[in-house]
Image (cartoon, helix red, strand yellow):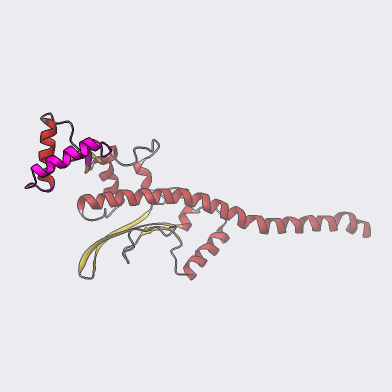
Amino acid sequence: MRKLLTYVIFPLLIIGLAYLLFRSINEPVKFQNELKQRSSVGIERMKDIRTLQVTYKDTYGHYAPVMDSLIDFYNNGKITIMRQIGSEDDSVAVLHTEAIKKQYRNLKGDKLMDKLYELYENGDKNLIVRIPQLTQVKDTLFRNRPNFNVNDLRYIPFSEGDTVIMKSIVKQVSGVDVPLFEAQMPYWSLLKGMDRQQIVNLVAEREDTDRYPGLMVGSVDNANNNAGNWE
């Protein structure tokens, strides 16, 4: 019996304890690594939502109320961008443009730009002109992202289909109407399938410190310049 204890049972107990110790150390590390990886994917999506919402507001004066409106804006909406003719690095063109502007000092803003463009179209190619141009949203935003799919914006990554929680309002701040929006990805969705107890601990820690338990951009409660809670 003593030999059995010495050569079999005790070694098995030691191996078991060592495994439990290793697991207790390794599981939190593994959880944190996957949390970081999933959060980076979620943050990129939240930044894309913010970019599209800010562009929507610049166009309509308020934020999109629902994700369908935001996606339709990307697919079918148009925005005005400024197209520049000529280069600011061309000192001759700069001096020439300033001289022409002095000739038409009675014109201001868009009227002056329209006149400069008219002169350019009539043959004066040595001008620097900035003109508004209407263009499709989808031809302007995220053009450098070949795998970008606007329909993905509605979904929380790794959640098996859970959708981003989004709100928008117009709120009075110091007597002024201020458009606000927020988008949220709860950890319970973003971290779906990961260690449940670790998620419980993370959510509790965030709630105990009065922080949103997940990723969040913007706020309908306070004007925060559309900041993300990861920033």
Taking the spot 47% from the left edge, 53% from the top edge, the residue there is 190
Residue 221's x, y, as percent?
32, 66
Q: Give left or right: position of 64 versus 3.
A: left
Q: Which residues are magenta?
A: 82-109
* Quarter location, residue 172: bottom left
Residue 59, percent from left and from top: 21, 49
Instruction: Please name the residue shown 72% across and 59% down the image.
Output: 21
Quadrant where the N terminus lies?
A: bottom right
Dividing the image into 4 quarters, which one contains the C terminus?
Answer: bottom left
Position of 165 with respect to 81 (left or right) is right
- The answer to whether one can see residue 1 in this image is no
Is 93 in the magenta? yes
Q: Could you tell me if residue 105 is visible in this image?
A: yes
> Residue 197's image quarter?
bottom right
Q: Position of residue 114 (x, y in %)?
A: 11, 40
Q: Residue at x 40, y 48 (%)?
A: 45
Magenta stretch: includes residue 44: no
Q: For this rendering, which residue is in front, 46 or 158?
A: 46
Q: Is residue 26 above or below residue 84?
A: below
Q: Residue at x 63, y 55 (%)?
A: 27
Rendered location of residue 26, percent (x, y) = 65, 55
Q: How many marks?
A: 0
